[in-house]
Image (cartoon, rainbow, N blue to C red):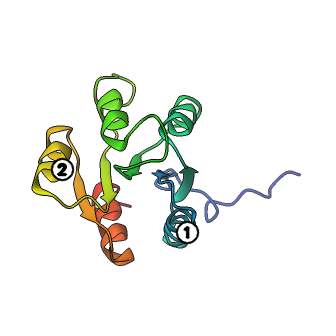
Amino acid sequence: MEGWWHPFFYTPAMQVRRVLIVDDEPYILRILAFKLRRAGYVALEATCGEEALELLDSVQVHCLILDVTLASATTGFQLAERLRDDPRFCRIPVVFLTARSFPADQRRGRELGAAAYITKPFSLQHVLDEVSRLLPA
């Protein structure tokens, strides 16, 4: 159908901003994905490190929200380390969202290049603020 396209629907300034959430708690995945979508992001969900790696291989991701403790063989720290050492993924900003609030854990997150380290319980607004800081419109 010719003539249906209109600049209002898409402009070069509009960019798809994909955020991958990796957490083994379904409620956290759902609420974060819902809030991110409402804020204009494309939210992808993974429940383990292996699933996250599969998604990262198939879809370009612009930010990663990552739990440290996952119910899988790969921890959040291990996943972040793999991403940091891979030239395809090393520039993706990582936001750790975890119940692990010990200073040693926070230090480890910073050593791995985390853009932010947020502890649970958390404010949804704080998470959205960090993502928007890392992925400005």
Asked whether 52 or 57 is in front, the reply is 52
User: Height in image: 82 above or below 41?
Assistant: above
Asked whether 77 or 64 is in front, the reply is 77
Task: Assess whether mark 2 and mark 1 are in contact (beta carbons under 8 angstroms).
Answer: no
Residue 25 appears left or right of 113? right
Which residue is rendered at x = 30% and y = 53% of the image? 96
Q: Residues within 10 Å of mark 2 (few under 14, many from 20)?
A: some
* Residue linked to disc 2: 105
Quadrant including the C terminus: bottom left
Q: Mark 2 is on which residue type? A: Asp
**First-in-chain label (1 vs 2):** 1
Give x and y (percent) for residue 31.
53, 71
Q: Which mark is residue 27?
A: 1
Q: Mark 1 is on which residue type? A: Tyr
Give x and y (percent) for residue 86.
34, 23
Residue 43 appears left or right of 115? right
Which residue is rendered at x = 32% and y = 59% of the image? 98
Determine the secondary structure under disc 1.
helix
The number of discs equals 2
Q: Residue 110 is drawn in which quadrant?
A: top left
Give x and y (percent) for residue 39.
48, 71
Q: Residue 90 is drawn in which quadrant?
A: top left
